[in-house]
Image (tube, helix red, strand yellow):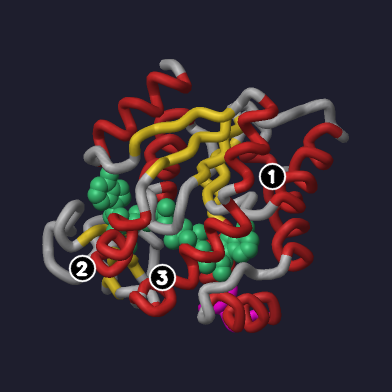
Amino acid sequence: MKIIMLGAPGAGKGTQAKQIAEKYTIPHISTGDIFRANIKNNTELGKKAKEYMDQGLLVPDELTCDLVMDRIKEDDAKNGFVLDGFPRTIPQAEALDKALSAIGESMDYAIDVDVPDENIVNRMSGRRACVECGATYHIVAIPPKQEGICDKCGSKLILRDDDKPETVQKRLDVYHEQTQPLIDYYKKQGILKSVDGTQDMEKVFADITDILGA
Ligand code: ADP
Ligand code: ADP
Ligand code: ZN
């Protein structure tokens, strides 16, 4: 099963993608996580990506596409994968379609997690991410058992630099301009499914599993 998660920053793509990956035993591929790991390890890619991410801008397609195309060719992705945060532009979507059609394949589902802008700033300012394993929480909606500590690995939780309100507004603008057109792109392909992302996390996941089937 090959799935794309669409939605605004903070809509809950990552939260849902992790659960999908677990239930269907496919890898969760998050470009944001890949960039953050590169920043942490101080790689050349990380240095370049950081300049854009800090401003709430997209990392250029040239730095993003090859990385994903290589990742989906890895062994663990041969039965499918869930893409979280990619594609984010029409050229990225076209690059993905081209790479898949070259091996006689195509995407199965694009799931749009729909959350209005009004809810996003609250989602982002309450988001806390684990510095080690990338697990995410929300201080009100999805709190960790112990404040500031990751349930999964015991490491410290932080507010991402790009989740500060100034940057969030910019990211929302970028989303509407560059990423939202993908909704139509996948509607035309007949693989778009929408879920109401304002519901609680469990209900959103139940709606998604209804779409994907047992
Ligand atoms: P969120 O889902 O909250 O928007 P992500 O972790 O997906 O956050 O992305 C964080 C940042 O990483 C983005 O704002 C952007 O700068 C960069 N990024 C992630 N994925 C892509 C992509 N596919 N294309 C370009 N930039 C990306
Ligand atoms: P994205 O990957 O789309 O940027 P996340 O999955 O990181 O979004 O979720 C953004 C924030 O909202 C996180 O703090 C997360 O814990 C919280 N969150 C996710 N799903 C829900 C939900 N259904 N209701 C309330 N908060 C949620
Ligand atoms: Zn952790």
Residue displayed at 40% across by 62% down? 134
Image position of 32 with respect to 131: above or below: above
Tell me whether the residue at label 1 lies in contact with that at label 2, contact meaning CB atoms closer than 8 angstroms.
Answer: no
Closer to the camera in the image, 29 or 97: 97
Of all residues, the one furthest to the right in this rendering is: 102
Magenta span covers which residues?
A: 38-43
Q: Which residue corresponds to mark 1?
A: 72
- Label 3, label 2: how many angstroms apart (C-alpha)? 24 Å
Position of residue 44 in the picture relative to residue 205 (left or right):
right
The image position of residue 186, as x and y in percent, is 64, 34
Distance from mark 2 CB to nearest ligand 3 atom below 8 Å:
no
Which quadrant of the figure shows ligand 1?
bottom right
Rendered image: mark on residue 168: 3
Tag 3's secondary structure? helix
Q: Quadrant of residue 119?
A: bottom left
Q: Which residue corresponds to mark 2?
A: 149
Position of residue 210 in the picture relative to residue 189 (left or right):
left
At label 1, the amino acid type is Ile
Which quadrant does the C terminus fall into? top left
